Image: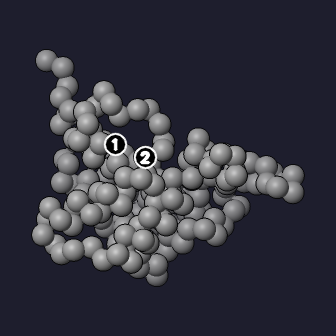
């Protein structure tokens, strides 16, 4: 019997949880920021694919990285509404949108039309012609530290929402 959309959504969610676990282990050992961000990007992307698979079916989920910016705020709204854990505030959605945008462009394939070369995986050439290395770059557009309440809340949302799809 072929896999169902629910099977696929659950698989994406389980992998998202594994990616978050890897991120936490990297954070606890002081790993480079690029690696923590890479696993955060992958977890967010897989949560979005789980969400889209349940909404639209696995066959309509394209093999792309461009899912996070548009879908993470929707997941947040739907998740808060469905779990009766309260209404998500406008400023929280605004913060999720900003972070989701930065998470999406971490994938090398999502370079914002060539304007964003920085990514968490591969070296790139900056505007001055210097080759930049992700492990030596500080990714100033995205603070993933525990002091950033918005990122902590977003990571908690990704984990809790992914648990719901498992």
The image shows residue 164 at horizontal and vertical percentages of 18, 54
Left-right relation of 32 to 2? right
10 Å neighbourhood of mark 2: few (<14), some, or many (≥20)? Answer: many
Left-right relation of 103 to 72? right
In the rendering, which numbered label is found on residue 75?
A: none
The image shows residue 120 at horizontal and vertical percentages of 60, 53
Q: Which residue bears the numbered disc 2?
A: 67
Which residue corresponds to the image point at 33% horizontal and 50% vertical from the top-left? 47
CA gap between label 1 and label 2 equals: 7 Å
Give the camera-side residue of 131 and 68.
68
Q: Which residue bears the numbered disc 1?
A: 49
Left-right relation of 30 to 133? left
10 Å neighbourhood of mark 1: few (<14), some, or many (≥20)? Answer: many
Q: Which of marks 1 and 2 is nearer the N terminus?
A: 1
Whether residue 16 can be seen here = no
The extreme front residue here reads 90
- Element at badge 2? loop
The image shows residue 14 at horizontal and vertical percentages of 27, 46
Which residue corresponds to the image point at 46% horizontal and 78% vertical from the top-left? 148
The quarter in which the N terminus is drawn is: top left
Color scheme of the displayed model? one colour
- Element at badge 1? helix
The extreme top residue here reads 1
The image shows residue 116 at horizontal and vertical percentages of 67, 53
Contact? badges 1 and 2 (CB < 8 Å): yes
The extreme bottom residue here reads 147
């Amino acid at each position: 019997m072929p896999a169902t959309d629910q099977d696929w959504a659950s698989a994406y969610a389980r992998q998202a949880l594994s990616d978050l676990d890897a991120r936490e282990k990297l954070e606890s050992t002081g790993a480079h920021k690029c690696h923590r961000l890479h696993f955060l990007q992958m977890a967010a992307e897989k949560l979005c694919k789980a969400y889209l698979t349940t909404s639209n079916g696995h066959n309509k989920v394209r093999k792309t990285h461009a899912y996070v910016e548009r879908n993470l705020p929707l997941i947040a709204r739907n998740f808060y509404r469905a779990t009766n854990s309260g209404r998500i505030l406008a400023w929280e959605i605004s913060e999720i949108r900003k972070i989701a945008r930065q998470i999406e462009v971490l994938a090398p394939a999502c370079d914002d039309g060539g304007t964003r070369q920085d990514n968490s995986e591969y070296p790139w050439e900056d505007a001055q012609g210097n080759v930049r290395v992700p492990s030596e770059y500080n990714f100033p557009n995205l603070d993933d530290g525990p002091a950033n309440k918005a990122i902590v809340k977003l990571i908690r949302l990704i984990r809790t929402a992914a648990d719901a799809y498992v």
